[in-house]
């Protein structure tokens, strides 16, 4: 187990919370033998979070392309997957007449907020690392006696 400190406290809480919620869903299903709508909704939210995080984590593979293109393609892939999932789920359970719109909005709004936060934080971190590298470059070591020129 990793040591908990101020830099990973929130992510550790999120990991523990996720495991507890997933465990609760599983235990409820085992104990009660019933799968309720809220259990399915929580599981779908977890799967969508997992997919979104995976797609965002692949940014490093596409750095040679403009950021705006990468963001749009990532979004289209994910929203396409959400719409495909909605379409397939329609074979098992009747969809509300606004089901596609509701899934689109329920995914797109949190995803847009998450992407904005993610990329702003990522570029802030990159600027911080670049500043540290520049400071290291600027602090050239003094030449020692006997160094070759």
Image (cartoon, grey):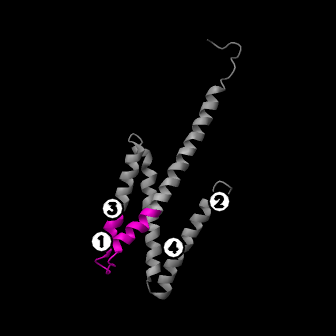
With respect to residue 128, does 21 lie above or below?
A: below
Which image quarter holds the C terminus? top right
Measured in 3D between alpha carbons, the distance from the residue under mark 1 to the one under mark 3, in whole angstroms, is: 10 Å
At 36% from the left and 70% from the top, the residue drawn is: 101
Separation of residues labelled 4 and 1 (CA atoms): 25 Å
Residue 61 is one of the magenta-drawn residues: no
Indicate the position of residue 119 as horizontal and vertical percent values. Answer: 50, 50
Callout 1: SS: helix
Q: What stretch is highlighted in magenta?
A: 80-109
Q: Which of marks 2 and 1 is in front?
A: 1
Q: In the depicted view, which residue is nearer to us: 4 or 117? A: 117
Of pointers 3 and 2, the one earlier in the residue sequence: 2
Disc 3 + disc 2, Cβ < 8 Å: no
Please give the residue where the numbered disc 2 appears in the rendered image. Answer: 9
Q: Going from the N terminus, do you reach mark 4 or mark 1 first?
A: 4
Real-space Cα separation, disc 3 to disc 2, in angstroms:
34 Å
**Which residue is more in the foreground, 9 or 99?**
99
> Sequence order check: which comes first, mark 2 or mark 1?
2
Whether 11 is drawn above or below 136: the answer is below
Q: Is residue 96 magenta?
A: yes
Say which quarter of the image contains residue 40: bottom left
Residue 79: image location, x then y, percent: 36, 61
Give how far apart the Cα atoms at labels 2 and 1 are: 39 Å
Main secondary structure found in the magenta portion? helix
Distance in Å between CA atoms under marks 4 and 2: 20 Å
Spot occupied by residue 57 in the image (x, y as percentages of width and height): 46, 52
Residue highlighted by disc 1: 87
């Amino acid at each position: 187990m990793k040591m908990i400190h101020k830099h990973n406290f929130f992510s550790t809480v999120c990991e523990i919370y996720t495991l507890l919620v997933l465990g609760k869903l599983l235990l409820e299903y085992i104990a009660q033998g019933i799968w309720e709508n809220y259990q399915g909704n929580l599981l779908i939210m977890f799967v969508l979070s997992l997919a979104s995080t995976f797609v965002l984590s692949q940014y490093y593979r596409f750095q040679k392309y403009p950021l705006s293109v990468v963001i749009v393609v990532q979004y289209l892939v994910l929203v396409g997957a959400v719409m495909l999932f909605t379409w397939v789920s329609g074979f098992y359970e009747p969809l509300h007449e606004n089901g596609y719109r509701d899934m689109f909005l329920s995914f797109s709004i949190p995803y847009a907020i998450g992407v904005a936060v993610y990329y702003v934080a990522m570029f802030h971190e990159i600027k911080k690392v670049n500043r540290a590298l520049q400071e290291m470059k600027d602090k050239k070591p003094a030449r020692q006696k006997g160094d070759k020129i």
